[in-house]
Amino acid sequence: MSGLTVRDLVVRFGATAAVDGADVDVAPGAVLALLGPSGCGKSTLLRAVAGLELPTAGTVAWDGTDLAPVPVHRRGFGLMFQDGQLFPHRDVAGNVEFGLRMNSVDRATRRRRVGELLELVGLTGYERRAIPTLSGGEQQRVALARALAPRPRLLLLDEPLSALDRTLRERLSADLSSILAETRTTALYVTHDHDEAFTVADEVAVMAAGRLLQTGAPARLWRHPADERVARFLGYRWFVPAAALRRAGADPDSDWPADDQDPAGSPSGAPGPVTAALRPESLVVDADGSLSGQVVEQRFTRGGTTLLVAVAGVGEVGAWRPGVGALTAGTPVRLRLVPEATALISPPPPAS
Ligand code: ADP
């Protein structure tokens, strides 16, 4: 078993099980995002992997070796937190080379490596800058360079971009993704932001109340959430029988890649009625759309209008209309289903 293997991990704080029986695998070179709402136990799981939290039960292993007896500083893991926790009295180079000094790496090698890392994170020439003079985004780039400097066998990132504003977060998450790929870094990435998780990770594990609900590649998770709970967390808000949509004239199965279908036609195998999960973008106002309904209410959002529309035989569902023209309640509209923006949820397997 290579890479990180976590089995049946439980971490309790008094009566609270912050992590309640989690299994996690990260293969060498892969990036796994742990995605879940605040308080679901993500950081505790990451801290237990780092060795900062003592598991109540279960194992954390690297390449099949149990890490229980191995202290934090001997695990060979790098850490990066929301607040970079840089040393304010050292300059940028002093921060980046810190782990190398601890490993007694010679001065010339340290200098070369600091230069390489600053180039990697887009801060070439920043060696002598004082930490308090850097922006929040630059400080996180330095924190990343510092964490990567000793070439950790696993990088643990705990909400590394959460303190930054949205625009900066979007840019840094894209940069982070390419830096992790370029350096073939194996990483476990904790976040509550699904855009960030989907940008950075090869696989995403959705977590709630101390347990992992579903793990999968972003595209698979996005289109086949295991259940309503996962779907809601990903931003799906309306749940209707796929058959009702079909009867009303829209086929949620159309345009689905063939390998997403099983022979029975349901997305992940289990027989029975499939639920279509919809976001506002799943149904778009379009004069040529195959569904017809009536506007119930509308709300202006970024770049367009989110409508609530009553569709006969389906019920009230959200819909999206570019622009901000007012449509009064009762206005008839036609809607087009966007299958790529729609998820299909199979019925749960029969209880054994
Ligand atoms: P997340 O990272 O998903 O926001 P955490 O792992 O920080 O969640 O916390 C999970 C739960 O464990 C929360 O209910 C939190 O209050 C609790 N918790 C975390 N750390 C401690 C601690 N040191 N002592 C007591 N409770 C804690």
Image (cartoon, grey):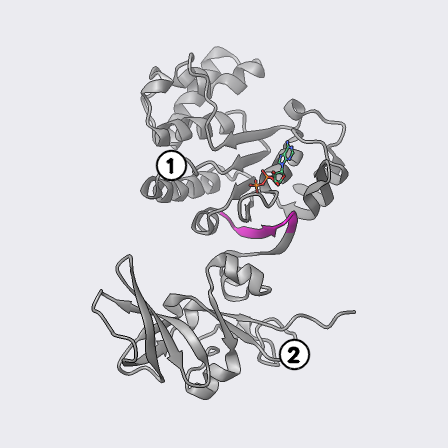
Instruction: Using the rendered view, name the quadrant where residue 261 is placed.
Output: bottom right
Q: Position of residue 279 (x, y in %)?
A: 42, 66
Magenta residue check for 208: yes
The residue singled out by tag 1 in the image is: 164
Q: Position of residue 317 (x, y in %)?
A: 42, 73
For badge 2, the amino acid type reads Pro
Magenta residue check for 302: no
Query: Which numbered disc covers residue 271?
Result: 2
Query: Which numbered disc covers residue 322?
Result: none
Q: Position of residue 272 (x, y in %)?
A: 63, 80
In this picture, residue 30 sits left or right of residue 19: left
Magenta stretch, residue numbers: 201-211
| Main secondary-structure element of the magenta-colored stretch | strand
Local packing at callout 1 (Cα closer than 10 Å; few below 14, some 14-19, many 20+) is some
Q: Secondary structure at mark 1?
A: loop
Q: Is residue 256 above or below residue 149?
A: below
How far, Cα to Cα, is label 2 from label 1?
Answer: 45 Å
Camera-nearest residue between 269 and 27 = 269
Q: Is residue 307 above or below residue 216?
A: below
| Sequence-wise first label, 2 or 1 | 1
Q: Nearer the viewer, mark 2 or mark 1?
A: 1
Quarter containing the C terminus: bottom right
For badge 1, the amino acid type reads Leu
Label 1 CB less than 8 angstroms from ligand 1: no
Q: Is residue 289 above or below residue 27?
A: below
